[in-house]
Image (cartoon, rainbow, N blue to C red):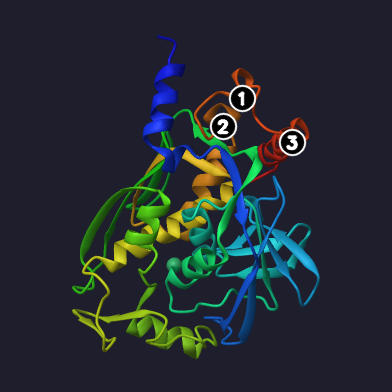
Amino acid sequence: MDGLPHLAMLHLDRPHYAAQAQRTLKAAIDCVGVGLHGGRRVHLALRPAGIDTGIVFRRTDLCIDIPARFDLVVDTRLCTVLAAPGQPDVRVATVEHVLAALAGAGVSNAIVAVDGPEIPILDGSAQEFTFLIACAGVVDQAAAQLEIAVLRPVRVELGEAFVELHPSSHGLELAVSIDFDAAAIGTQALDLLLTPDTFRDELASARTFAMADEIEALQQAGLAQGGSLDNAVVVDGAVVLNPGGLRCPDEFVRHKMLDVVGDLALAGTRLRARMIGHRCGHALNNQLLRALFADHANWRLVSGAGWPIAANPAMGSAGGLAGLRDHRRALAASPS
Ligand SMILES: [Zn+2]
């Protein structure tokens, strides 16, 4: 057997991670919220976009687009921050939760329009973005969904923290573990195959979290101005300060995995890989993508059904495919 019939069966049996077509939103939808760090009221709209657009943030107050690409990440200290190509001061912050919701729903192409420098934090999770996407609806487009298949292990580390990518035969498999001194968190681990169902049911509602003393320091430094118990889990040692407690006992590791899904969406298209992370955060997640794309031998583009591009002529428009290839070449060639 040459492998292709097997892959075809895999596709039929497991439609979630073998979607062949690119997808966008059926309609535009919007919401209003506050930015976590600036505390400003922000209007956000999710809009449909054409084939091979990818996810693009649009600063409607400046009329400037910022593509969701790992090489445009300029800050990862508190959240993931992107800057427009060649314009490092034109930024959009806290992109990870809306990116996770779009990736989780299998949306390939969309415009995320925002009239300020920060995506609204909403309830600190991705569930409101997931709800908006479900309300708008998702529609297949007339071009193949490409995936970046990881061909050999890639690892980055910092102290005890590390994150790795390994080859996988299907989809994006995630294994994340955390280890915090705070007794309310402690050690937690989660292993998950990313599909629209698992994202919605297992990850989307997990909220961001912070330590009470860290929040005090951040607010004294003028950050986290929009932060409250309405949009973050706040931990003080063994105690969760939110009156309603946790949404699930391991909400913390679920949120860490949600962040991973959002940060890895900055690869530009879906990853086919097994990701293993321990104590990972936005900085390591971004370094992982930079390490992956630093060497073209680490990855190749394949269609969502697992067929190598060269072996599958029914792959959508040649122009679109060539454009995406050029895009990836440019990323691979760019200094990290
Ligand atoms: Zn987060």
Residue at the image position 43 percent from the left and 69 percent from the top: 127
Q: Is residue 87 left or right of residue 126?
A: right
Residue at the image position 43 percent from the left and 79 percent from the top: 123
Ligand 1 quadrant in view: bottom left
* Labels 2 and 3: the sequence-earlier one: 2
Q: Nearer the viewer, mark 2 or mark 3?
A: 2
Give SS at disc 1: helix
Residue at the image position 63 percent from the left and 20 percent from the top: 310
Identity, as a three-letter code, of the amino acid under mark 3? Asp
Residue assigned mark 2? 303
At which x and y percent is residue 100? 49, 59
Q: Is residue 137 left or right of residue 157?
A: right
Residue assigned mark 3? 326
In the image, is residue 287 above or below residue 114?
Answer: above
Q: Are there few (<14), some (14-19), or many (20+) residues within 10 Å of tag 2?
A: many
Mark number displayed over residue 309: 1
Mark pair 2, 3: CA separation: 16 Å
At which x and y percent is residue 179? 25, 61
Give SS at disc 2: strand
Identity, as a three-letter code, of the amino acid under mark 1? Ile
Q: Nearer the viewer, mark 3 or mark 1?
A: 1
Residue at the image position 42 percent from the left and 88 percent from the top: 228
Judging depth in this view, the residue of 143 and 95 nearest the camera is: 143
Which picture quadrant has residue 186?
A: bottom left
At which x and y percent is residue 211? 33, 79
Judging depth in this view, the residue of 162 and 259 nearest the camera is: 259
Identity, as a three-letter code, of the amino acid under mark 2? Ser
